[in-house]
Amino acid sequence: KEAKGGRSPGHAGCADRFHRPARRVSLPPRAARSRSWTSRRQPDVIDRVAMTSTFLITDIEGSTRLWEDHDEAMATSLEAHDRLLASVVGNAGGIVVKTTGDGLLAVFDSVSAAIGAALEGQRALAAHDWGSTGPLRVRMAIHTGAAQRRDDDYFGPVLNRVARLLAIGHGGQVLVSGASRAFLPDARPDGYELVDRGEHRLRDLDLPERVFEIRAAGL
């Protein structure tokens, strides 16, 4: 499916949910992380040196309706969703920064790692037996840029842009920004292709974004 260029209320909402208070995930000790962080900081101290990272954000399509129709089953399905995605993020060398109610935000050192996690995540979600909720259709977006870090969270325009990019996607889609595409080599032996979906205006952002959709086996 192609990325949608419009601003439907349903899709705009997922970017707003990204900014709501999140369910926090305990991160491993800094010494055990693949990223080379600086020494432990005091609470609320902001790292003013913006670090270029690649962010993956996800969202369950139609989750509000699912909660209305399958309250108890959805709680179980959300636990499975979180577990599956946290596993593929960790296997790809990424870190789950936080969960966002019906999705998650993860950070990676490379675009290739983020794409690998997204692909494996979509395949794991497709293979899972979801019971009465039916398959959870999850949209994903990947964007690269400089963000500031406060404690174990990230802030800045790069997070706004990846959230808005996510909002134009469909369940089952993985969208990649032009900024992330620029970090990939022309030859990609990873078994996927990037389909150019052109430039899109993203809600509340001045500059348009060139959008690519990942096509791969199992998606």
Image: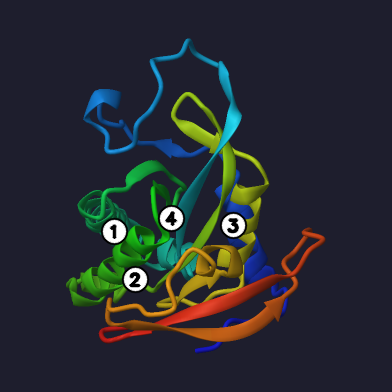
Tag 2 or tag 4, which sits nearer the N-term? 4
Name the residue that disc number 2 marks. Answer: 136
Residue type at numbered disc 1: His
The answer for how far apart the CA atoms under marks 1 and 2 are is 8 Å
Observer-side mark, 4 or 3, equals 3
The answer for how far apart the CA atoms under marks 3 and 2 are is 19 Å
Q: Please indicate whether residue 69 sits to the left or right of residue 116 in the image.
A: right
Tag 3 or tag 1, which sits nearer the N-term? 1
* SS assignment at label 2: loop
Q: Please indicate whether residue 114 sits to the left or right of residue 89 in the image.
A: right
Observer-side mark, 1 or 3, equals 3
The numbered mark at residue 163 is: 3
* SS assignment at label 4: loop
Label 4 packing within 10 angstroms: few (<14), some (14-19), many (20+) = many
Which residue corresponds to the image point at 78% horizontal and 64% vertical from the top-left?
A: 207
Name the residue that disc number 4 marks. Answer: 102
Name the residue that disc number 1 marks. Answer: 81
The answer for how far apart the CA atoms under marks 1 and 3 are is 19 Å
Observer-side mark, 3 or 2, equals 3
Which quarter of the picture shows residue 10? bottom right
Q: Do the residues labelled 3 and 2 touch (CB within 8 Å)?
A: no
Q: Please indicate whether residue 176 sits to the left or right of residue 129 in the image.
A: right
Report the residue that reaches farthest toward the bottom. 1
Which residue corresponds to the image point at 34% horizontal and 31% vertical from the top-left?
A: 36
Tag 3 or tag 4, which sits nearer the N-term? 4
Residue type at numbered disc 2: Leu
Q: Do the residues labelled 1 and 3 touch (CB within 8 Å)?
A: no
Tag 2 or tag 1, which sits nearer the N-term? 1
* SS assignment at label 3: helix
The answer for how far apart the CA atoms under marks 4 and 2 are is 10 Å
